[in-house]
Every structure is written in C-alpha cells, then in structure tokens.
C-alpha cells in the first residue's frame, strides 16, 4: 500500500507535482490488485480530491497565462 500524503491534513492543498505523485501511487495500488477492499473507497475518494485540486490548479494557471499574453499583446 501507499504511504500517507506528505501533508498533515488530506484536505489541505498540496503542490501539483505532489498531487500527481500521490495519484500515481493510488493507480499503482489499484493496478496491483493488492489493495484491501476496505481501503478501496477511501483510495478512490482521495483520487477524486486530488484530481479536483489538479484541475483547479490547471484552470488557474491557464487564466494567469492568458492574462499575461493579453497584456503582452496590448504593448
């Protein structure tokens, strides 16, 4: 099984790269067929939380980049 995330509270936002790393660990657990059935729902729920955080971060970054490009085009 995977180790717990590097944060003390799983609901705290973590960096994009750490979220991806944790997602990969969850995928590896699921693919290995070694995951305890009692942990399955928790793993899937955590993966959903991480995916939502990543999507939020990507959207935010996209908006920032678009603003920068727009500002450059105004000059």
Image: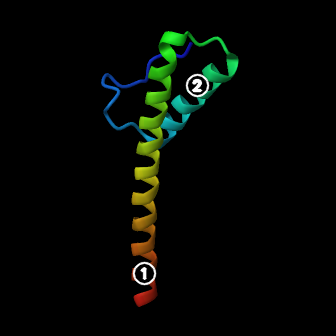
Q: Is residue 75 visible?
A: no
Q: Is residue 28 visible?
A: yes
Marks 1 and 2, how far apart in space?
Answer: 38 Å
The quadrant of the image that shows the N terminus is top right
**Badge 2 is on which residue?**
25
The quadrant of the image that shows the C terminus is bottom left
Q: From what the image shows, is residue 52 above or below residue 40?
A: below
Using the image as rendered, state which of residue 65 and residue 33 is in the foreground.
Answer: 33
- Color scheme of the displayed model: rainbow
Q: From what the image shows, is residue 71 above or below residue 6?
A: below
- The answer to whether residue 7 is left or right of residue 29 is left
Q: From what the image shows, is residue 4 above or below residue 45?
A: above
* Local crowd size for mark 2, using a 10 Å CA cut-off: few (<14), some (14–19), many (≥20): some
Which residue ends up furthest to the right in the rendered image? 32
- Residue 38 position, x and y percent, is 48, 11
**Badge 1 is on which residue?**
70
Q: Residue at x 42, y 51 (%)?
A: 57
- Residue 52 position, x and y percent, is 43, 44
Q: Nearer the viewer, mark 1 or mark 2?
A: 2
* Local crowd size for mark 1, using a 10 Å CA cut-off: few (<14), some (14–19), many (≥20): few
- The answer to whether residue 30 is left or right of residue 42 is right
Q: Where on the picture, by quarter, is residue 49?
A: top left
Q: Residue at x 44, y 29 (%)?
A: 45
Q: Are marks 1 and 2 in contact (CB under 8 Å)?
A: no
- Residue 17 position, x and y percent, is 51, 39
Q: How many marks?
A: 2
Q: Circle 2 sits in a helix, a strand or a loop, which is it? A: helix
Q: Earlier in the sequence, mark 1 or mark 2?
A: 2
Q: Circle 1 sits in a helix, a strand or a loop, which is it? A: helix
């Amino acid at each position: 099984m995977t180790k717990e995330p590097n944060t003390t509270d799983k609901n705290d936002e973590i960096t994009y790269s750490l979220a991806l790393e944790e997602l990969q660990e969850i995928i590896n657990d699921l693919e290995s067929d070694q995951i305890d059935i009692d942990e399955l729902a928790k793993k899937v729920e955590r993966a959903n939380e991480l995916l939502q955080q990543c999507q939020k971060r990507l959207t935010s970054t996209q908006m920032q980049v678009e603003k920068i490009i727009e500002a450059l085009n105004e000059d």
